[in-house]
């Protein structure tokens, strides 16, 4: 089944190098494929990933993506962000989050060609992302951009400028791309709740101002821990910051389901979700 999904949904993962930054998301060595710490091991758990469809929905349309699907045309997605987009914490490149939404989309769209490009760079902030936006995103003419943002602003304890977010979203929308903002991961060891919620509120306000969708990753992961009572080690890697294989899989499949719900409505069927142990 897994091989069949990949035959139907083309996933292109391109790894990038980035300078090491002190006190930010842990960088990985320069490589042509994602280089991950040797201590990372695949996670295999028997409990189903918690998924609540009414909470996973995106609150803004993905008009271009929906139209491409309706016309049976290929869909190109760019995953933009820092190290949790790049894949730190995952055991393999295929286990990083950008490879996973395509699998979930293929479940609901088995004949749809979907390409996902990984444009994550370790330690990057919004202002740095803007400097490479033309080359790494605009030039690809994507139909959908998934922009993960805010984690390094929290780690460095620096302001996240709404104007940077608005500029980036405006430039993406000018080429007709749909945009989904993704807020920081829930990692209590590193983030004071008040600081994290402040960053989340800034991202949420920016998405509303630009009329683009937002996926609430922080709330999703917090719910895993506080409501579903999953230990942090179930979804966080050895460093206590980045997600592990199960965490990336559950997050990405929740995101993929949210995208399907937005472009197809009630036709979405949630299945194939990962499992976890309490």
Image (tube, grey):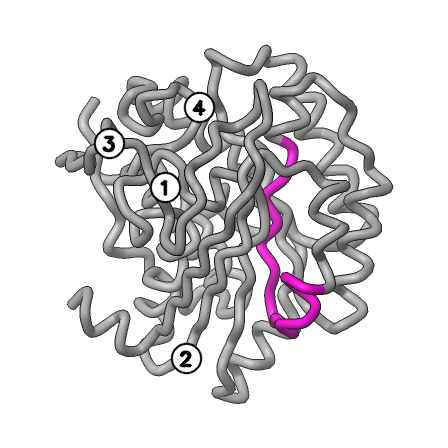
231 inside magenta stretch: no
Is the residue marked by circle 4 packed among few (<14), some (14-19), or many (20+) residues within 10 Å?
A: many
Vertical position of residue 257 compared to residue 111: above or below: above
- Label 1 to label 4: alpha-carbon separation: 12 Å
Q: Nearer the viewer, mark 2 or mark 4?
A: 4
Identify the residue position indicated by label 1 in the image. Answer: 248
Identify the residue position indicated by label 2 in the image. Answer: 113
Vertical position of residue 110 compared to residue 144: above or below: below
Secondary structure of the residue carrying numbered label 1: helix
In this rendering, would 214 be left or right of 263? right
Identify the residue position indicated by label 4 in the image. Answer: 241
- Percent x, y of residue 27: 48, 33
Mark 1 or mark 2: whose residue is earlier in sequence: 2
Residue 208 makes an appearance in the image: yes
Vertical position of residue 87 compared to residue 221: above or below: below
Is the residue marked by circle 3 packed among few (<14), some (14-19), or many (20+) residues within 10 Å?
A: few
- Percent x, y of residue 242: 42, 29
Q: Which residues are magenta?
A: 135-150
Q: Nearer the viewer, mark 3 or mark 1?
A: 3
């Amino acid at each position: 089944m897994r091989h069949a999904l990949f035959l139907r949904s083309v996933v292109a993962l391109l790894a990038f190098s980035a300078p090491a930054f002190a006190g930010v998301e842990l960088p990985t060595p320069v490589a042509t494929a994602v280089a991950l710490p040797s201590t990372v091991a695949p996670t295999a758990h028997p409990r189903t990933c918690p998924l609540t469809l009414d909470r996973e929905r995106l609150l803004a349309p993905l008009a271009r993506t929906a139209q491409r699907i309706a016309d049976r045309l290929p869909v190109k997605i760019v995953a933009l962000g820092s190290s949790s987009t790049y894949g730190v914490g995952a055991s393999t490149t295929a286990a990083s989050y950008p490879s996973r939404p395509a699998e979930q989309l293929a479940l609901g769209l088995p004949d749809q060609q979907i390409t996902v490009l990984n444009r994550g760079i370790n330690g990057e902030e919004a202002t740095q992302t803007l400097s490479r936006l033309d080359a790494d995103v605009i030039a690809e003419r994507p139909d959908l951009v998934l922009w993960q943002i805010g984690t390094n602003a929290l780690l460095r304890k620096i302001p996240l400028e709404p104007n940077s977010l608005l500029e980036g979203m405006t430039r993406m929308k000018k080429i007709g791309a749909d945009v989904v903002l993704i807020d920081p991961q829930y990692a209590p060891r590193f983030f004071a709740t008040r600081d994290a919620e402040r960053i989340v509120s800034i991202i949420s306000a920016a998405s509303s101002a630009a009329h683009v969708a937002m996926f609430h990753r922080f709330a999703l992961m917090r719910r895993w821990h506080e409501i579903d009572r999953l230990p942090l080690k179930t979804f966080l890697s050895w460093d206590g910051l980045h997600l592990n294989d199960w965490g990336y899989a559950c997050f990405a499949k929740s995101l993929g389901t949210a995208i399907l719900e937005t472009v197809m409505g009630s036709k979405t069927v949630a299945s194939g979700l990962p499992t976890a142990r309490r």
